[in-house]
Amino acid sequence: MDTVNTIIVGASAAGLAAAACLRRAGISFVLLEQAQQVATTWRNHYDRLHLHTSKRLSQLPDFPMPNDYPPYASRNQVVDYLERYAGHHQLEPVFGQKVLSIVQDGDADGWLTETDAQPYRSRHVVIATGYSRQPNMPFLNGQDEFQGEILHSSAYRNGASYAGKSVLVMGFGNSGGEIAIDLVEHGAQAALSVRHPVNVIPRDILGIPILALALVLNALPVKLADVLSWPLLRLTIGDLRSLGLQVLPYGPMQQIERDHRIPLLDIGTIKLIRAGKIRTYGGVERLTAAGAIFDDGAGKQANFDAIIMATGYRPALADFLPAAAQITDSSGLPLVSGQETALRGLYLCGFYIAPTGMLREIGIEARRIAAHIKANP
């Protein structure tokens, strides 16, 4: 059985950042990745995806994004960056090993990690598999009756095959909003099902990334931050209620803290809704053979050729971590990220929903984890 100080699970952004910081700290590690390449999470996203955070606020430790990248890097550019990042730090993940279980070592102060190829013993484990490990695919009433296509956003690539078709996108997060734009750009008739009240923030204000403002607001109590930002958001976004959308009774910063959800960073969705190019509906009450009936109280219904569920993901830690209930809430979401969990020697990296951007937060967490492991070898 191989023995090493630290096992890192997952070789996308969080795992690579953790590995780079551990290497710099002089700590031995093995970086495990189920796929045959780094950045699998990013490779599997839809074609149109771009970072919603500026490249200046999206760089991992000790290696900046290339100067020739645009302000908001594309999916392919992020993949390229992560490949370069691994090369720069001379990281050599062990590819093709699926982690089956991670359990505390009963005979020693450490952990046993079992893969489909071999076991490992380590003093520490860093889980960097992220929130997007398992698609959240709800089953809808009447789903068996619907004659069209139903897919999760994780299986969506682009709107080319939907030209001339009517497509319902379920979900008003950043994936749902951008997929709706992509569908319109490819000639589809797009609609959004918005079940709950929402917040919307612009990606930029006068050319300044909104997350640069979030860095300042993040130092304030969340209620105060929302009060201060409300006039600016109202000026730039307008009254969402005039578009038939319900608005949350609390602002974006409170939404992130309370609901663990990032509000929609608008890159054109609202403009298309105002122009009538993206229709909006409430939640789906049930599907019919030809479409959907919505829960607006009036029995509103519409026909669709396809339904794309932009309904998020689950971290699904319990799939390979039997003790997951000790470090997650009742919904299976981690209680902490970027620090040692309640289980000694076990860390999570990349699981905190940050108002200042995920890649930036991953870098902060990776440095903190490496420092803690170095101080507690």
Image: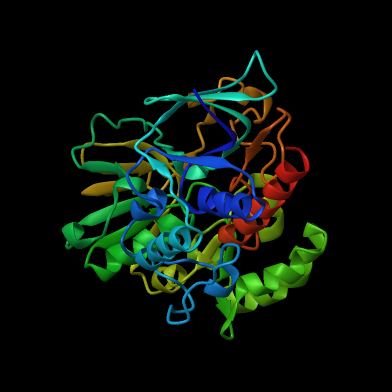
Residue at 17% from the left image edge and 57% from the top image edge: 161
Task: Please tell me which residue lies in front, 367 or 299.
Answer: 367
Task: Please tell me which residue lies in front, 303 or 329.
Answer: 329
Q: Is residue 2 visible?
A: yes
Rendering coords of residue 228 (x, y %): 78, 71
Is 95 on the left or on the right of 316, as rendered?
left
Q: Which quarter of the figure has residue 375? A: top right
Above or below residue 202? Residue 356 is above
Residue at 29% from the left image edge and 51% from the top image edge: 156
Task: Please tell me which residue lies in front, 232 or 22.
Answer: 22
Residue at 37% from the left image edge and 25% from the top image edge: 116
Above or below residue 20? Residue 204 is below
Residue at 39% from the left image edge and 31% from the top image edge: 98
Rendering coords of residue 179 (x, y %): 35, 59
Is 296 on the left or on the right of 276, as rendered?
right
Is 52 on the left or on the right of 305, as rendered?
right
Q: Which quarter of the figure has residue 35? A: top left
Rendering coords of residue 317 (x, y %): 53, 30
The residue sitting at the bottom extreme is 206
Rendering coords of residue 371 (x, y %): 73, 49
For the image, the number of numbered tags is 0
Q: Is residue 353 visible?
A: no
Task: Please tell me which residue lies in front, 316 or 125.
Answer: 125
Quadrant in the picture for the C terminus: top right
Is 75 on the left or on the right of 26, as rendered?
left
Colouring method of the image: rainbow
